[in-house]
Amino acid sequence: MNMRILYIAYPLLTVSEDSAGGAEQVLWTLAREMSRRGIDTTVAASAGSDVAGRLFVTGDPCSRTDAFERRNHDHQARIVELVCHRRRAGAAFDLVHDMSGSFWPRAMEFDTPLLATLHLPRHFYPPHLFENIPANVSFSCVSQTQAGTFHSLGALAGVVANGIALDRFALSVDKGGEKPRGLLWLGRICEEKAPHLALEIAQRSGVSITLAGQVYPFSYHQNYFEEEVIPRLQQIPGATFLSAPSAQTKRRLLRQAQAVLITSQVEETSSLVAMEAAASGTPVIAFARGALQEIVRDGVTGFLIENVEEAARAVRRLGEIDPEACVRHTHQHFSGSTMAEKYCELYQQARSSGLTLAPTEL
């Protein structure tokens, strides 16, 4: 497929293999897969990003929420300028793929088709973003559960499940003689992800636990960590916290864990952690919220639970899960290659239909 594609990242964070954000990890994987296919890719992102293809730097990353509007304005303005410049220079992009969560209203300033992937639950988006949608914009969702909440969106082109770079994970479940090291919680440290519930599960189960993740420099995240997480960590023997682990460290933790706990209290639209755990041959114990019911196959790759008590009982059943089945399931459903193929189908629709993507049945 001979195309020039511009990918748009979230403006506050960098895109790399070590990115903490799920959308950034997906973008890194997708750009890598497309470059492998010989597709000309450009990623518009913050300075310090490390991506396949070309990097178009839109400015420095910014972790302060009070500076978001200024950073986002500069980010978007530079991207519009790039798209228009490339067209004038006779090297126009064939498609813009918006992974940033808010760029698509600017598509009215150019005629290049734009596909916007929606990563978040619908209520996380300001309603005005879905008013007066430009004619050259269509949307994709990352799970059927999420798509159900966007059924009234006429410009919805389809569903493409997130995928992971499977070659970064062991292709077999041979743990190399490593002894399982208790439970693992991995993610962004914030109230909606509820790592405090993971600590309660570990305490009830009498099993050690490692919390690994990043506390963003936002006051409400930091207050939650100090008030709800640190006291519980201090009460549980053997509980440890690892801040902002690298991709390599995360893979080691996933490989060594007896199980990964996913305790999110929101309707998750996807879960890269659940995919990565299964790819490592490690079962997942997750609250049955949102798309986790599509990703975790209950009784095969882990257990779907409703509360802390059920989770503690599930810990005692981990011996029922076959690690090989976890790996097979992930390779069948959540590879980066499969994700890229599905997006290529949507890109071809964009190319063949001119300014708009033809909606398809979900």
Image: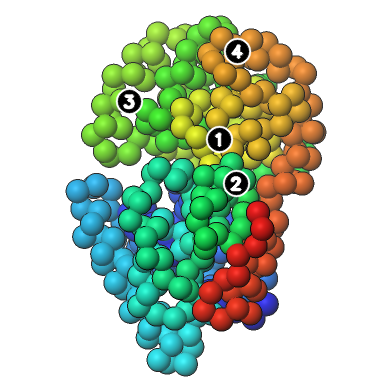
Sequence-wise first label, 2 or 4: 2
- How far is the residue under mark 4 from the one under mark 1? 18 Å
In the image, what residue occupies the spot 28% across and 48% down?
Answer: 63
In the image, what residue occupies the spot 30% across and 32% down?
Answer: 221
Which quarter of the figure is the N terminus placed in?
bottom right
* Neighbour tally class for label 2: few under 14, some 14-19, many 20 plus, Cα within 10 Å: many
Q: In front here: 178 or 89?
A: 89
Q: Residue 255: tell me if it is visible.
A: no
Circle 3 sits on which residue? 225
Report whether 28 appears left or right of 79: right
Marks 1,2: beta carbons within 8 A: yes
Circle 4 sits on which residue? 310
- How far is the residue under mark 4 from the one under mark 3? 25 Å
* Neighbour tally class for label 3: few under 14, some 14-19, many 20 plus, Cα within 10 Å: some
Circle 1 sits on which residue? 290
Marks 3,1: beta carbons within 8 A: no
